[in-house]
Amino acid sequence: QQIQHLAGTSAPTTIIHLARLLVFLVLLGIIPSTIIFLVDISVHKVFDLRESIIELDIHSPLAVFLFALTGVALCLASTFVCHLCSTEAEGSGIPAMKSLMSGFYDKVKPALSLWALLAKTVGLVCAIGGGLPVGWEGPNVHISCIVAHHLSRLPPFRALRRDRALRMQIMACACAVGLASSFGTPIGGVLYALETTASFYLVPTFWKCVLATLAGSFVYDMLYKTPLVEAFANTSFGDTPYRGQLPAFMLLGALLGLLGAFFVRCVHTLYLLRKRRLPGTNRYVLLFVFGLVAALLQYPLPNFRLDPRLAINDFFSAEKMDMFSLPEVAILVLVKFPLIVISIGLPVPAGVFIPCFLVGAGLGRLYGELLNLLFGQNVVAGGYAVVGAAAFTAGVTRALSVAVVIFEVTGQLKHTMPTLAAVLISVIFANGINRSLYDALIIMKRLPYMPHMRRDRTPEQKVHHIMRTDVISLPEFCSLVQIRETLDKYQSFDSFPIVTKDGLLLGSVRRRSLLNLITRANANIPAEAHTAKPIERHAQAPQESEESPDKDLSVQEADLSVMESEDEQARKQLIPQDQLTINQSFRTRLEPDLSPLIVTANTSLSQLHFMFVMLMPTHAYVLIGGELQGIVTRGDLVQSGEPPNLPSHPHLSELAPT
Amino acid sequence: QQIQHLAGTSAPTTIIHLARLLVFLVLLGIIPSTIIFLVDISVHKVFDLRESIIELDIHSPLAVFLFALTGVALCLASTFVCHLCSTEAEGSGIPAMKSLMSGFYDKVKPALSLWALLAKTVGLVCAIGGGLPVGWEGPNVHISCIVAHHLSRLPPFRALRRDRALRMQIMACACAVGLASSFGTPIGGVLYALETTASFYLVPTFWKCVLATLAGSFVYDMLYKTPLVEAFANTSFGDTPYRGQLPAFMLLGALLGLLGAFFVRCVHTLYLLRKRRLPGTNRYVLLFVFGLVAALLQYPLPNFRLDPRLAINDFFSAEKMDMFSLPEVAILVLVKFPLIVISIGLPVPAGVFIPCFLVGAGLGRLYGELLNLLFGQNVVAGGYAVVGAAAFTAGVTRALSVAVVIFEVTGQLKHTMPTLAAVLISVIFANGINRSLYDALIIMKRLPYMPHMRRDRTPEQKVHHIMRTDVISLPEFCSLVQIRETLDKYQSFDSFPIVTKDGLLLGSVRRRSLLNLITRANANIPAEAHTAKPIERHAQAPQESEESPDKDLSVQEADLSVMESEDEQARKQLIPQDQLTINQSFRTRLEPDLSPLIVTANTSLSQLHFMFVMLMPTHAYVLIGGELQGIVTRGDLVQSGEPPNLPSHPHLSELAPT
């Protein structure tokens, strides 16, 4: 099943399956886009309301007070709703989605609750409405993933969830829709989803993303072409040749790349500083202070209170700017930069694209105006603003797809080459200095992330250096009592390895199959019947199990080290204990029905890491001369998000060559 | 090494490595683009020359004769150069590159020779110049891959080749450059490379592709903006709203998708027909007949002799067409369609994009003009031509990136939504009927291709159904004589599994390590020294070996069934036979220095296929209770290109549950 989709050469199994998938993807495009529009229009209303306060009388202290009060109240409301509903809604959301897409669906699941959706939407409206310089594309991606998660749990689409590869593809589509519907950029969204994917991108995701973003763009097009909210305006650069200016564009890219890296560094430093100096700061105090500062800074300058899209449109214009003078642009950039750095770390929903666009466009405009002054009319400053917006955002996020987003936002392909060149140079320069903002946030928030190997591991280490030797296994010939005891004791394990009496690995068996075996034995079915063709019978197990579709993925990984399980009660009831009196001592032969990932003890960690990244298993068994000698779980190898509590490594002297 | 690039989270090891890579990628952009331009300008010269014959006197029989003669001569020359230099240069080249990118670098290597480059370029000039309706994007992709292959073998870049993952990424970049430089479409090229990649796309490929295509586009921009050859003109659609016409665009997409599928079917049927009815047809006879037909058809109509780009530009125009009347468009499409179908199968270099663009644009224009007639001036027929070109090409190639290519070609993002929608519908409809043209060609040409499982395998089969049991292994304690005999006997094997005396698998050892062992033993180094820390010592082997960098990839896979090797002499000399008199009977302990892919016998083929696709190994060992019982090579599982000669499968009754 999984393979078929992965290979992508054949159509999905049936017409019904395909139809289901198509409807799902269209809905996945439409629903988040609608939510995103509603959020945007709410923000707009809040803006208008606060603007009307100022319009009363700009010089009255009452207006200042009311403006600041509403700002602070909204900021507090934003963090309150996150505090109340789901703290997972704080921040951008993209780091969590990157973690999810690298294979940690289950660990990130709390961030996919409907409470998180509520907190994210309401919190976002309050945060932007309250005057925080935050963007909405990260939260939108998050919102869209939550919608995808819950949509796929509805009965008509549940069949889609069963396929692990397809589930990952659906989440990639959700990411694409989130970004595409923020800006009305279907192709940019698809490319962004590609780059968000941690390490490899399944090619069949591509058409699914296109369909979903297309449906989303259709909604965007319908709604944003109304005069209800501001949208990005198309640029209209003429045919002025710019080929000679390519070096200037590239220099701009390099400078903004370095600035982007500096931005990430600032966010990181601020985070460390706050953690060390002000470890217990109340979230409300933070928001109160910052909301007040933001309100007071914005009050005197109407341009500061503008929807960033209007400012960006002005920076991008081919002619003279309408709303900004050059010193105003400079002040805007200087003031906004630190504000943005701070707000990214605040406990409210906060995106980063739009603020970066704004700063980058401003800087690009200034740079362009300077060049215009120096070299004359051939230099269109608006073009530099476009390139600057893309380059700075790329320097922060390290996403090349920003270039495509900007083409679609501006509706012109005029600056293809300078934009691509500047973005590429920006990313290369910034990567030379530090990680992307999202990767930095992943590390700060201790999210599990597959492509990062744990810091206490080196690629040259061998598997036998890190494996755990306390593997729980079942013997080939095993009594029902023994099975039941093992199942009881290791409630959280989803499968068990089976070994011969010499410890040689035969394969592994699902918990479910063992439970079936016990149930059947107690129902007095002759014992021989179990073992006659158990492989075929057990192979049907995955289709039967819809009650816990995610269990296979990571339960075992997460809890192999934790010997006590929390949901003991939930599982225990599955074993009909009262019937266990019969056949207690009967020894049955266990047949493996799973094929675990097996490696030899001298496999290098770099190779094992490669296998974990590509195959996304939860664990691998380690064989030494055919004997099951150890186990390595995903958490033993990759950055798992938990503080590293190293298991004791027994000295494996027997492995050293003698 | 491999992992680091794959994960893409850290920068390449050193600044030098990065600089090398950057220079390489820029060259990879520049060189193929220049070659492509030179080919194009040569075609143009040939066109002009033949055109001048007609201009003498269009009604004279001499002119007809000369025109036909030159046409036929050029067609014959095209196939002659392929026949002489490299038959691998025939056809599109994209199927071979798809096969390469799915993991069969070595098998496709003959297609990467410099002879193939010569045949492809000269053959392409003659074929297009001779009036065959063939495109150049497929050959350009091929040319670009050949350049990448040879460029990476130059001393400064050889270090890049060592990294298998990087090597694959470089080939993806080459594909991107090939397409991007054919049309001047950097983003479209990058996306096309993504779709060409068989099943998964390593995300770090993305920036490399962007850099290479950008360098290529720079060259394109410089050269094609000269008046030397025709280039695509930008379209200039006004602001006529088209939202209400979306259903019409979608219908066009569906129709052209079906037509695209029909096109693929025609190509396939024609291929089978030719193979059955005319098995021994001489290539020159084919080309003579077809060249004559093409020349005679083109002679009377000047529009048939046009550079297809000029015709496409005319179809795309927002106004009335300059050069074509509507009946002429209809005739062009009707005549070109079968001609294109036939020429794809001819033994000359032949692309498919441009001819498909032409037919699709023509059909779209006709459809648009019809709508215009029915619904009035709001319908811009040129817009339908744009959408039609994209939709038909997508229907044939199943590449969604065609949509992006067309945006870049036309320089307008005006029709984003209708184009994307039509292309998507076209691909979905066409996929419902058959495979893409490239996949069909891969099957016709029996190329190895990883995503296709062999037809005699089903995903439900288990590994023990298909494994070979005649595994060649070395015992743990082994005399030098035994090692030497094994090395001599199985010259083509690159590694050998090591088993205990009970047949339990310990790991596997490289041929190179065994050779080292023998050499060292003969140099009278005390035997204990070999086995003291052999893992560390052997681990350095891959860095030392530059003489056969590709051997690791697939030699073992290809030849495990073939017991006689052809290059016996070449390898034998590595063993210093005259020195083997000493230490003949000394039994040394072999240490495994490789970690092979291991699976249990009841692993399903779908799972094994997944592992082969994702990890690209050449073989997997099959364990039953720790014992090495079988081996499955890549060729046993995936479509290997060779006629299926099934190995005898011993009846594995011992595996059936008892």
Image (cartoon, coloured by chain):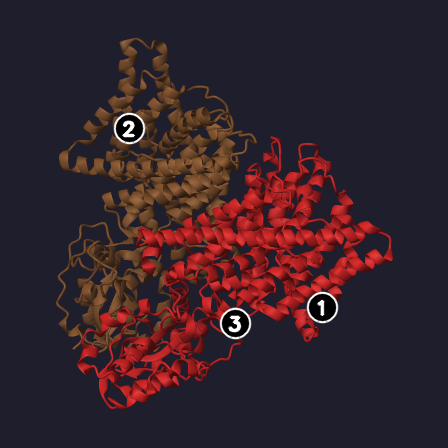
Chain colours: A brown, B red
- Residue A310: which disc? none
Mark 3 touches mark 1? (CB < 8 Å):
no
Give the residue number, with chain letter if any, for mark 2. A339
A371 lies left or right of B577: right
| Few, some or many residues within 10 Å of mark 1 (<14, 14–19, 20+) | some
Label whose residue precedes the other's in the sequence (3 or 1)? 1
Which of the pair B353/A179 is nearer the observer?
Answer: B353
Mark 2 vs 3: CB contact within 8 A? no
Front residue of A133/A140: it is A133
Q: Chain of mark 3?
A: B
The numbered dot on residue B286 is 1
Q: Chain of mark 2?
A: A
Instruction: Note whether A71 is above or below B105 in the view shown.
Output: above
Mark 2 → mark 1, Cα distance in angstroms: 72 Å
Q: Nearer the viewer, mark 3 or mark 1?
A: 1
> Subunit of mark 1?
B
Residue A196 % position (x, y)? 37, 47
Quarter of image, res B296: bottom right
